[in-house]
Image (cartoon, rainbow, N blue to C red):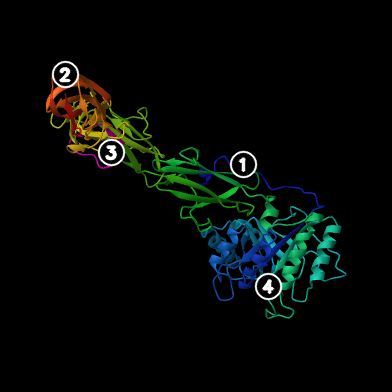
C-alpha cells in the first residue's frame, strides 16, 4: 500500500563521490541513556540533528530513554537507530543470538514507525559475520567505535576522517575515544586538523552527557557544559565548510527532507468550504534517498512515527486540520505541513418578517414591508434569494438585500444558500393585503355663521357668537382650525371645538382638514362690531334764544366706530328735518307762523344702529 501511495516519488542512489574539502561531523549517541535526551535542546539551538543508537530491549527501563522520548527525538528530526536488543557483543555471540539481537532490535524500531536504517556495533566490535547479519536484517550501515585517529593521541597517524561516502558502509570508522578526560580543546583541535587535512567524515561517539557519571574512570561521558561549548563552537565552523549531519544523511547522501502536499477530492485544496465529506490525498516527492513513510494526524497534534501511516486517500467528514510530514531513507524528517479542510454539511435557516414583526395570518390594510434573514453556524450565509411570482427560488432569482414592499396579496417564496453551497428547502409566506378604499383627493368645505345666521357684511353692536362647520364626502372632517389675528391657519392654529365670541372687530380666518390629509384653501370673514353710540349736541340756536322766520338749526355729531349715518332734528318732538352723515349738520326750521316756547333736540344714529339724543335746547318763537 505504501508503494502505491508514494508512486511518482523520485528515488536516486546514494552519492558515490564528494568533495573532501568539506568536513562533516556526525554526533552519535550510544546506548540510549536517559541523560542523552537533554542534548536535544542544545542541538536545537543551532538546528543540528544527532543519531541516537538505542538498545530497544532496555528502552523505558531505569536510566534509559523512554519510547515517547525517542518519538519526540525523531519528530524533531533526529535519527533513532539500532544498537541490538541488549548491547550484546556480536563477535562473541553465536550467529543465532547475534541475528536475534540485530533483527529483533530493528523490528522493534520499525514496528513503532521508526525508519531504523543505521546501526552501531556494541563495544565497536564487529567482523565479517556481524556485518553480514546487520546487512541481512535490513540496516543500511554499521558504525564501529574506532579506526580513525585517537582523539587524544599525538603519535597516531591514522586518518582523521573517512571518505564520503565511506568505502564500507557496514564498517564505518570513528575516532576513539570520547571520555570524561577529553577536553574541549582536544575536540576542537581534532576537528580543525580534519578541516586542514582535506576534510571528510568525522563520526563522534558519545555516551552519557552528565556530571561525574559512569562507572569507569575515565568514564565514557561528557559534561553538559563541555557538550554545550563544543556544539556552540561547531556551529561557528560553518564558515569553514564544516557541517553536522546524521549518519543516515551521510550514508544516503541525502540531507534534504522530502516535500509533501495535500489534495482534496483530487484537486488543490480550497481555502474555502466544502459541502460534504472530502477525500484527502497526500503526495510526496524526494530527489534523494526516497520516501519511507508519510504520516498524518486529524486531531491537531504533530505527526510522529506513532501517528497513522498514510496508505491512501483519507475521508474527512467534518472541519479538520490535516497535519502531515514524510520520512526518507536518509533519516530526514520533513517539517510538519498542515491543511485546513473546512466542511459545512448543514444548510442555513432563513426567516421572514412583515412590518418588523412576525407575519400575520390575516390581511394587512396597506402595503407591507417584508424582510428576510438567515443564519448559518459554520461557513456563513452567502445569499438569500426570493420570488414573488410563485416560482421556486434558484441561483438566478432576485438576491435579497433590503426590505421590499408587497402592495397586493402575494406568496413570498425564499431560501438561503451558505458559503459551502448548501441550500435549504424553499420556504413560503402568504402576505395578504386588503383592497385599498377609494382615495380621497378632495378637500373638505367649511362655513361660518354669526349669531346663528349668515354673517353680515355690516356692523354689529355687540359681541358676536361665531360658529364654524365643515363637510367632507369621503374620509371625513378631521379638524377645523382658525385665527383671529389675520394670520393663515395652520396645523398648529387653534382647533375649533364649538362657538366662540368675537367682542371687537376682527377677521376670522378658517379652513378644514379631512381624514386623508386634504386641506382646503383658507376662508375669511370680517366681523365688525360697534357697541358705542355716537355723540351729538345742538350748537345753534343757543338755549333761551328768540327766533323768527327761517332759523338754521345746527348740530355737531361724531362717531368713533361705524360712523354717523344721519342726524334728525325735533321741535317739541316733531321732526323738523334730517341730514345724512356726521360732523356739522344744519337744517332750516321755518318759525314764521309759530309763537311760543319750543324744545329742540337732535338724534344721531351711527351705521351700526346705535342712537344718541342730544341735550335739549329751549327757544321762543315770535
Q: Earlier in the sequence, mark 4 or mark 3?
A: 4
Q: CA distance from mark 3 to mark 1?
A: 68 Å
Q: Earlier in the sequence, mark 4 or mark 1?
A: 1
> Vertically, is 21 above or below 428?
below
Horizontal and vertical percent position of residue 489: 29, 32
Residues rendered magenta in the picture: 355-370
Q: Do tag 4 and tag 3 residues touch (Cβ < 8 Å)?
A: no
Q: What mark, if any, has residue 209 been given in the picture?
A: 4
Q: Which residue is mark 1?
A: 10
Q: Which residue is mark 2?
A: 592
Q: What mark, if any, has residue 153 been given in the picture?
A: none
Q: Which residue is mark 3?
A: 355
Is any part of residue 519 visible from this angle? Answer: no
Q: Earlier in the sequence, mark 3 or mark 1?
A: 1
| Nearer to the camera, 251 or 301 | 301
- Element marked by disc 2: loop
- Viewer-nearest of labels 3 and 1? 3
Amino acid at each position: 500500500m505504501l508503494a502505491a501511495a508514494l508512486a511518482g516519488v523520485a528515488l536516486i542512489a546514494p552519492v558515490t563521490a564528494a568533495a573532501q574539502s568539506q568536513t562533516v561531523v556526525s554526533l552519535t549517541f550510544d546506548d540510549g541513556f536517559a541523560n542523552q535526551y537533554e542534548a536535544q535542546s542544545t542541538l536545537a539551538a543551532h538546528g543540528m540533528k544527532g543519531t541516537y543508537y538505542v538498545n530497544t530491549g532496555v528502552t523505558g527501563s531505569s536510566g534509559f530513554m523512554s519510547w515517547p522520548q525517542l518519538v519526540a527525538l525523531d519528530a524533531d528530526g533526529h535519527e533513532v537507530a539500532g544498537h541490538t536488543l541488549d548491547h550484546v557483543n556480536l563477535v562473541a555471540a553465536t550467529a543465532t543470538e547475534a541475528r536475534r539481537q540485530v533483527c529483533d532490535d530493528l523490528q522493534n524500531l520499525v514496528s513503532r514507525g521508526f525508519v531504523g536504517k543505521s546501526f552501531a556495533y556494541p563495544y565497536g566490535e564487529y567482523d565479517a559475520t556481524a556485518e553480514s547479519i546487520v546487512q541481512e536484517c535490513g540496516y543500511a550501515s554499521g558504525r564501529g567505535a574506532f579506526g580513525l585517529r585517537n582523539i587524544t593521541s599525538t603519535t597516531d597517524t591514522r586518518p582523521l576522517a573517512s571518505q564520503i561516502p565511506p568505502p564500507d558502509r557496514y564498517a564505518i570508522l570513528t575516532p576513539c575515544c570520547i571520555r570524561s578526560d577529553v577536553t574541549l580543546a582536544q575536540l576542537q583541535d581534532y576537528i580543525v586538523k580534519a578541516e586542514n587535512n582535506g576534510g571528510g567524515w568525522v563520526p563522534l561517539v558519545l555516551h552519557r552527557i552528565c556530571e561525574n557519571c559512569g562507572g569507569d574512570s575515565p568514564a565514557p561521558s561528557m559534561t553538559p557544559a563541555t557538550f554545550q561549548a563544543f556544539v556552540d563552537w561547531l556551529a561557528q565552523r560553518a564558515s569553514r565548510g564544516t557541517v553536522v549531519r546524521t549518519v543516515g544523511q551521510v550514508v544516503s547522501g541525502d540531507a534534504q527532507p522530502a516535500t509533501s502536499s495535500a489534495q482534496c477530492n483530487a484537486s488543490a485544496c480550497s481555502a474555502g468550504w466544502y459541502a460534504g465529506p472530502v477525500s484527502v490525498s497526500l503526495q510526496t516527492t524526494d530527489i534523494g534517498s526516497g520516501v519511507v513513510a508519510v504520516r498524518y494526524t486529524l486531531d491537531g497534534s504533530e505527526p510522529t512515527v506513532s501517528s497513522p501511516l498514510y496508505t491512501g486517500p483519507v475521508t474527512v467528514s467534518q472541519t479538520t486540520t490535516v497535519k502531515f510530514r514524510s520520512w526518507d531513507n536518509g533519516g530526514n524528517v520533513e517539517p510538519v505541513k498542515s491543511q485546513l479542510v473546512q466542511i459545512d454539511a448543514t444548510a442555513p435557516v432563513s426567516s421572514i418578517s412583515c412590518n418588523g414583526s412576525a407575519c400575520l395570518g390575516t390581511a394587512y390594510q396597506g402595503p407591507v414591508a417584508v424582510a428576510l434573514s438567515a443564519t448559518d453556524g459554520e461557513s456563513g450565509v452567502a445569499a438569500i434569494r426570493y420570488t414573488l411570482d410563485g416560482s421556486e427560488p434558484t441561483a438566478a432569482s432576485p438576491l435579497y438585500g433590503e426590505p421590499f414592499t408587497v402592495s397586493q396579496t402575494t406568496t413570498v417564496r425564499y431560501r438561503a444558500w451558505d458559503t459551502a453551497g448548501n441550500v435549504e428547502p424553499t420556504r413560503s409566506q402568504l402576505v395578504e393585503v386588503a383592497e385599498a378604499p377609494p382615495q380621497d383627493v378632495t378637500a373638505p368645505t367649511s362655513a361660518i355663521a354669526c349669531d346663528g345666521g349668515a354673517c353680515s357684511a355690516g356692523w354689529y353692536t355687540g359681541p358676536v357668537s361665531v360658529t364654524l362647520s365643515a363637510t367632507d364626502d369621503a374620509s371625513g372632517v378631521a379638524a377645523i382650525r382658525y385665527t383671529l389675528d389675520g394670520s393663515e391657519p395652520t396645523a398648529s392654529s387653534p382647533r375649533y371645538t364649538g362657538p366662540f365670541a368675537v367682542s371687537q372687530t376682527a377677521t376670522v380666518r378658517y379652513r378644514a382638514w379631512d381624514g386623508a390629509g386634504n386641506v382646503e384653501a383658507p376662508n375669511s370673514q370680517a366681523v365688525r362690531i360697534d357697541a358705542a353710540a355716537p355723540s351729538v349736541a345742538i350748537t345753534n340756536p343757543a338755549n333761551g334764544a328768540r327766533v323768527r322766520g327761517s332759523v338754521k338749526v345746527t348740530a355737531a355729531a361724531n362717531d368713533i366706530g361705524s360712523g354717523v349715518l344721519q342726524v334728525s332734528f325735533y321741535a317739541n318732538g316733531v321732526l323738523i328735518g334730517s341730514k345724512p352723515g356726521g360732523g356739522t349738520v344744519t337744517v332750516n326750521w321755518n318759525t314764521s307762523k309759530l309763537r311760543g316756547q319750543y324744545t329742540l333736540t337732535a338724534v344721531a344714529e351711527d351705521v351700526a344702529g346705535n342712537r344718541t339724543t342730544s341735550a335739549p335746547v329751549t327757544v321762543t318763537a315770535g
